């Protein structure tokens, strides 16, 4: 439900964003297996951020794209650039994106919203399905775009493309 809720929130805040969902993931109730997964903190925010992306298996481009969530727009990157490295308007890990190899992606996303959305969707999907294994060494979510089916006029199953309404309806049903 957490992943589905995250997707619904992102799609609601960003109507042009379409994120696939693969249901069935269940976390351990006691948190077992999460030991050692907390972010490592280094002397500089830049090293901390780049290490975090590498540990997660993200490309630098995907990591920089994910930084703008929950509102995925070029304006966030324009505002970050305008604020600069010494601004208190953004946190130290956001400002680290203005350094080294990460700056090229900040500039790219400030100018190209389509590239931002593509990298964001790729990074988000990777993060939400990276540890979903079916058969040996095959991701169980490969090729799955949505877990929700509805019937068409003939009674056949048709995949839904937007999750926002589904989640809202489901949450309202719980209240």
Image (cartoon, rainbow, N blue to C red):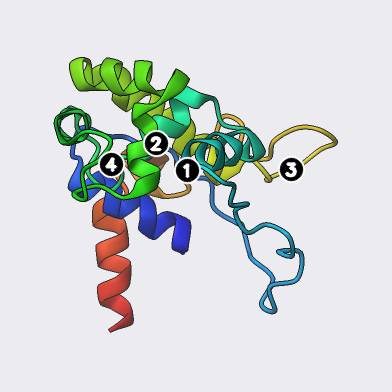
Q: Position of residue 79 (x, y in %)?
A: 15, 34
Q: Is residue 115 above or below residue 93?
A: above
The residue labelled by disc 1 is 45
Residue visible at 56% across and 31% down in the picture: 58
Quadrant containing the C terminus is bottom left
Circle 4/circle 1 CB separation < 8 Å? no
Of mark 4 and mark 1, the one earlier in the sequence is: 1
**How far, Cα to Cα, is label 3 from label 1?**
32 Å
Viewer-proximal residue among 111 and 84: 84
The residue labelled by disc 4 is 153
Query: For the residues carrying marks 4 and 3, which lies nearer the camera in this image?
Result: 3
Query: Crowding near pointer 3: few (<14 within 10 Å), some, many (20+)?
Result: few
Residue visible at 36% across and 40% down in the picture: 67
Q: Which mark is on residue 85? A: none
Provide the secondary structure element on which disc 1 rests.
Answer: helix
**How far, Cα to Cα, is label 4 from label 3?**
35 Å
**How far, Cα to Cα, is label 1 from label 2?**
6 Å
Viewer-proximal residue among 149 and 114: 114
**Is residue 50 rendered to the left or right of residue 82?**
right
Of mark 2 and mark 4, the one earlier in the sequence is: 2
Circle 1/circle 2 CB separation < 8 Å? yes
Of mark 3 and mark 1, the one earlier in the sequence is: 1
Q: Which mark is on residue 96? A: 2
The residue labelled by disc 3 is 133
Residue 165 image-quadrant placement: bottom left
């Amino acid at each position: 439900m957490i992943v589905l809720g995250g997707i619904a929130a992102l799609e609601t805040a960003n109507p042009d964003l379409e994120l696939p969902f693969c249901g069935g993931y269940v976390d351990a109730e006691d948190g077992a297996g999460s030991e050692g997964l907390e972010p490592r903190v280094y002397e500089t925010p830049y090293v901390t951020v780049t290490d975090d992306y590498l540990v997660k298996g993200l490309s630098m481009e995907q990591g920089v794209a994910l930084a703008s969530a929950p509102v995925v727009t070029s304006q966030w990157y324009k505002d970050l650039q305008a604020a600069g490295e010494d601004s208190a308007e953004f946190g130290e890990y956001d400002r680290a994106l203005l350094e080294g190899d990460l700056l090229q992606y900040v500039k790219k996303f400030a100018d190209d919203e389509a590239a931002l959305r593509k990298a964001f969707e790729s990074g988000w999907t990777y993060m939400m399905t990276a540890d979903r294994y079916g058969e040996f060494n095959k991701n169980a979510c490969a090729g799955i775009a949505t877990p929700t089916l509805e019937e068409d006029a003939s009674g056949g199953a048709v995949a839904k493309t937007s999750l926002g309404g589904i989640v809202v309806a489901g949450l309202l049903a719980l209240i």
